[in-house]
Image (cartoon, rainbow, N blue to C red):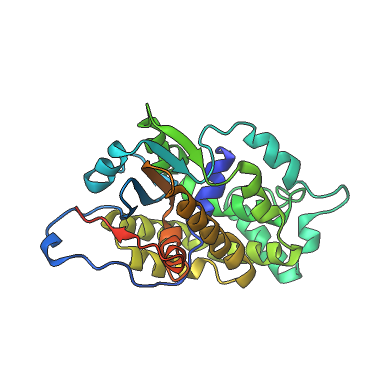
Amino acid sequence: MPPFRRFIAALVALAMPACAPVDARPAHAAAAYQGPAIWKVADKDTTIYLFGTVHALPKDTKWFSGPVERAYKASDELVTEIPMDASGDAQAIAARALLAKGQSLRAMMAPDDRMKFEEALVGLGLPIEAMDRFEPWYAAMTLSLLPVIKSGYDPQTGAETKLTAEAEGKRKAALETVQQQIDLFDGLPVEAQLSFLKETVDSISKATTTLDAMVAEWMKGDADALAMLLNDELDDPVLYKRLLTDRNTHWAQWIDQRMKQPGTVFVAVGAGHLAGRDSVQAQLRKRGIKARRVWE
């Protein structure tokens, strides 16, 4: 099992809002950098870069270059979704993911959903009782990640891992704690958790194909296409609000407050949070703050 922070992050990267326009490439930049997208918010003494990451990548994916590399090297501080050196992940998940004694996950499911769930477990090489003791949100996350990990995607080579490895001399901070990210799922109503699990089971067969396409668009810096691809992964309004809208609003508030302090900050969050109608940039606009795409 990968560290819990990356376990959550890889899932959230697939849970995206609907497409919305982003800054168009200037004509003079037509032949410029082709790579992951990055935005900048700045005033006279503060610059905050917003970089959308993919948390699990195929080994040897080359993305750290151009304006992303320059912005990172110019930054004094790295801010990620949660602390990258967080400890106690396994203990935290064990304490929160287990059902109450006497409960069984499969017993909570409708007959048709249970049958599809069991078929999915067998298809992944797991016994049908493998998830019986766990809450639906945990089972959903497990089934989200196993297919892509088996296909060669490695959380240990994700973008945050690279940024952290290059962070010598930089201050580090986080937008959330591990416990807050657990709460995002553990605090969902059971009905929403079961809906989440059902959607996950239904999407297992295309999980790797979807992630392949997502990484391709991420590598091209096409935030609109990325949002369109990933919109299909989250259509439950409760999950959408909890995982995307509320968090993006909170992060925009954090950025607004951080602009009052001088310095250069590199904020790295799942790419989906920086694309779509309810993106962090959209929440910043509501506060009168313009995030501009960095092209070169």
> x%, y% of residue 19?
40, 72
Q: How many marks?
A: 0
Q: Can the viewer see residue 32 in this picture?
A: yes
In the image, what residue occupies the spot 63% across and 56% down?
Answer: 140
What residue occupies the far right of the structure in this picture? 102
Q: Give left or right: position of 153 versus 95.
A: left
Q: Which residue extends farthest top?
A: 169
Q: Is residue 18 above or below residue 85?
A: below
Using residue 262 as the reference point, say whether residue 102 is left or right of it: right
* Quadrant of the image containing the N terminus: top right
Location of residue 163 in the rendering, given as x and y in whole percent from the top left corner? 38, 37
On the rendered structure, is 288 left or right of 63? Answer: right
Q: Quadrant of residue 272?
A: bottom left
Q: Nearer the viewer, residue 104 or 161?
A: 161
In x, y percent, where is residue 174? 52, 42
Residue drawn at 22 percent across, 56 percent down: 295
Percent position of residue 78, x then y: 41, 39
- Quarter occupied by residue 5: top right
Q: Is residue 41 left or right of residue 138?
A: left
Q: Say whether residue 147 is visible.
A: no
**Front residue of this view, candidates 65 and 72:** 72
